[in-house]
């Protein structure tokens, strides 16, 4: 059996087989990977793309990840925090545009204690009870995650970044441990969140074996969501001179993950759109099924500078929604107004 068929039927490969597929130079094999991934996504989701309203509510961060423009050592960022009222205004705007999931993302910001976060979550749930809340606010204690869950948060995105501890140590200051990150992911899952993990493709010092390690880690975790996108350098970080990740490799990873996890929610990320003007469409055609347009107020959005070129790619909510909509229609896909929860099996008709 060829590798693509094997992956599509067994949802797993041996380490050397993953590596062969990832690096294949056989055009027929490569094309089969993309075509199978696309078919699996269509079989499971009917050419329907879920939309999530991204609210980047704080760019303060106590962490110092070497790759990220929000790192605390970066003195060139103008820092901001949205108030609860501003966040609710973003949600209202998003709701009227058809969003039924709000993704609250930010740096690790001490200001947003459990009390403050729980108050925001409860308010969103009170005004928009038919919407899901996804949090992406980094590492916290299990107790804290439990409180956020009890307040009504449904999902949590915490990219593991790399499943190799040596690689992890080259992307972060010495005191940050991969094991802490993985413990957080385990806690989140045990508490009951729909959990998302993921990694950057083409991060500095990456080798193909690390990507294979990421696939195997994700297989163990069985996440509901998988966020991957290319690494893109940011001019005020230690990685400013590093090469960005490649479009082709990112798409291959998306396709492989779609065959491993037929029902997972996999976004075509803003980083993909930053790398290539048609990046989101390529992502969808490689098996992605989620898009996260940005609902952050424009003035603040310009300051959420994770990597260079991000603002232009994320665009203004209404126009970016129109653009994405027309890009999707051109390839026969459509956006749906739906919470788009993870269901491990195909829902009943
Ligand atoms: N602070 C939270 C955390 O780290 O989990 C959430 C926000 S953080 C900005 C979200 C993700 O952005 C990170 O997990 C990382 O993978 C991605 N990111 C940061 N810098 C990046 C870069 N230079 N290129 C591509 N992605 C990047
Ligand atoms: Fe902070 Fe997240 Fe950026 Fe790390 S990746 S510096 S935790 S915002």
Image: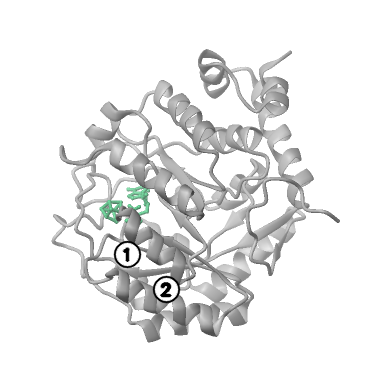
Note whether residue 124 is visible.
yes
Circle 1 packing at 10 Å, graded few (<14), some (14-19), many (20+), is: many
Q: Which image quadrant is residue 59 in?
A: bottom left
Q: Kindly identify which residue carries mark 2.
A: 296
Indicate the position of residue 183 as horizontal and vertical percent values. Answer: 35, 42
Colouring scheme applied when the structure was drawn: one colour
Q: Which image quadrant is residue 169 in?
A: top left
Q: Quadrant of the C terminus?
A: bottom right
Query: Within 8 Å: ligand 1 and the Cβ of disc 2?
Result: no
Label number found at residue 304? 1
Q: CA–CA distance between discs 1 and 2? A: 9 Å
Indicate the position of residue 22 as horizontal and vertical percent values. Answer: 54, 24
In the foreground, 55 or 202: 55
Residue appearing at x 55%, y 20% in the figure: 18
State which tag comes first along the sequence, 1 or 2. 2
Label number found at residue 278? none
Query: Within 8 Å: ligand 1 and the Cβ of disc 1?
Result: yes
Q: Is residue 169 above or below residue 78?
A: above
Q: Quadrant of the N terminus?
A: top right
Residue appearing at x 37%, y 23% in the figure: 207
Q: Is residue 319 above or below residue 51?
A: below
Q: Which image quadrant is residue 241 in?
A: top left
Q: Indicate left or right for 276 with 256 as reference.
A: left
Circle 2 packing at 10 Å, graded few (<14), some (14-19), many (20+), is: many
Note whether residue 297 is visible.
no
Indicate the position of residue 17 as horizontal and vertical percent values. Answer: 57, 15
Identify the secondary structure beneath mark 1: loop
Residue appearing at x 23%, y 41% in the figure: 239
Indicate the position of residue 12 as horizontal and vertical percent values. Answer: 61, 24
Do the residues under discs 1 and 2 have CB atoms within 8 angstroms? yes
Q: Is residue 224 above or below residue 86?
A: above
């Amino acid at each position: 059996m060829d590798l693509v068929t094997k992956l599509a039927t067994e949802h797993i490969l041996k380490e050397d087989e993953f590596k062969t597929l990832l690096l294949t130079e056989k055009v027929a094999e490569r094309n089969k990977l993309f075509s199978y991934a696309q078919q699996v996504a269509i079989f499971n989701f009917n050419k329907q793309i879920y939309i999530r309203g991204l609210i980047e509510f704080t760019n303060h961060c106590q962490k110092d990840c070497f790759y990220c423009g929000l790192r605390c050592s970066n003195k060139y960022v103008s820092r901001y925090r949205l108030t609860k009222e501003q966040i609710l205004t973003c949600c209202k705007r998003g709701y009227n545009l058809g969003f039924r999931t709000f993704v609250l993302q930010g740096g690790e910001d001490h200001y947003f204690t459990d009390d403050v976060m729980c108050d925001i979550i409860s308010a969103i749930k009170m005004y928009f009870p038919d919407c899901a809340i996804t949090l992406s606010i980094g590492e916290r204690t299990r107790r804290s995650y439990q409180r956020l869950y009890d307040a009504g948060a449904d999902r949590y995105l915490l990219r593991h970044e790399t499943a190799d501890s040596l690689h992890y140590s080259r992307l972060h200051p010495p005191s940050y441990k991969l094991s802490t990150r993985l413990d957080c992911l385990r806690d989140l899952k045990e508490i009951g969140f729909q959990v998302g993990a993921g990694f950057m493709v083409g991060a500095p010092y990456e080798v193909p074996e690390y990507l294979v390690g990421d696939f195997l880690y994700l297989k163990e975790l069985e996440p509901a969501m998988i966020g991957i996108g290319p690494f893109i350098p940011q001019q005020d970080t230690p990685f400013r001179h590093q090469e960005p990740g490649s479009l082709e490799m990112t798409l291959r990873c998306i396709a492989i993950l779609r065959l491993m996890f037929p029902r997972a929610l996999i976004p075509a990320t803003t980083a993909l759109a930053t790398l290539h003007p048609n990046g989101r469409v390529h992502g969808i055609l490689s098996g992605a099924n989620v898009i996260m347009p940005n609902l952050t107020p424009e003035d603040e959005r310009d300051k959420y500078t994770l990597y260079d070129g991000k603002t232009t790619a994320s665009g203004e909510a209404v126009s970016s929604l129109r653009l994405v909509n027309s890009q999707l229609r051109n390839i026969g896909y459509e956006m749906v107004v739906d919470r788009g929860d993870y269901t491990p099996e195909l829902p009943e008709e």
